[in-house]
Structure formats: C-alpha cells, structure tokens
Amino acid sequence: MEFEHDAARHRYLGRIDGEVVCSLDYAESGDVVSMTRTFTNPSFRGRGHAAEITAHAVGEAQAAGKRVRPMCWYVAQWFDDHPELAELLA
C-alpha cells in the first residue's frame, strides 16, 4: 500500500494501484495528534488496511515527537493491540 499525507485536510490516504482504499483523519494541537476517524472502503474491508494506515500515521506522529490521542474506536483498539506503544498516548 502507498500512503499519502494530505496535511491541508488533516488526512492520511492509503492507495492500492492508485485507488483509495482507506483513510485516517486527525486534528493537531501542540504536540498531540488526535486521530478522529478511520475508514476503509467496504470492498476492501477485512484485509488489515485500517491497521496499516493506523500504524503509518502513528509512526509519523512518533517520528515527529508527538503523542497520540485516539478519538476513534479503531485507533483505541489498535493501541490496545500494541501495548508496547502506550508511551505515545496522550
């Protein structure tokens, strides 16, 4: 999957062969990135794409020295599945 960061729209997009298959929306306040929504197009669900884009967005936040506030149930669940990254939680 290829990732695109649309900073103007506060959104990450995941593409396969140029087609958008998933997205993650966020808001920033200081050093906190609030991840507000994940979405996977219905025909691509169940293949782990939401996990991929969440991991990518969390990695970008971590690399920028930011913390993450999960506002979306999926992102909260993703952090439950990755307790080794709990120090990133805001």
Image: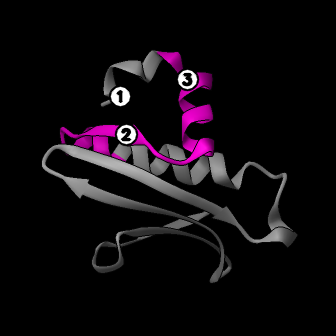
The picture quadrant where one finds residue 90 is top left
Magenta stretch, residue numbers: 60-83
Residue holding disc 3: 82
Mark 3 neighbour density, 10 Å: few (under 14) some (14–19) many (20 or more): few
State the SS at label 2: strand
Point out the image quarter for the N terminus: bottom right
Q: Decide which of tag 1 and tag 3 comes sooner along the chain.
A: 3
Contact (Cβ within 8 Å) of mark 2 with mark 1: yes
Residue drawn at x 13%, y 49% as measured from the top left: 30
Pick the residue in front: 22 or 80. 80
Residue drawn at x 82%, y 59% as measured from the top left: 45
Mark 1 neighbour density, 10 Å: few (under 14) some (14–19) many (20 or more): some
The picture quadrant where one finds residue 19 is bottom right
The answer to whether residue 40 is above or below residue 84 is below
Query: Residue 59: x and y, percent?
Result: 38, 42
Query: Residue 82: x and y, percent?
Result: 55, 23
Q: Is 7 situated left or right of 72 in this image?
A: left
Mark 2 neighbour density, 10 Å: few (under 14) some (14–19) many (20 or more): some
Q: Is 66 situated left or right of 11 in this image?
A: left
The answer to whether residue 31 is above or below residue 38 is above
Q: Give, as a three-letter code, the residue at label 1.
A: Leu
Residue holding disc 1: 89
Of the two numbered discs 1 and 3 in the rendering, the one whose residue sits closer to the viewer: 1
Pick the residue in front: 49 or 1. 49
State the SS at label 1: loop
Residue holding disc 2: 69
Query: Residue 18: x and y, percent?
Result: 63, 83
**Marks 2 and 1, Cα distance to the nearest angstrom?**
6 Å
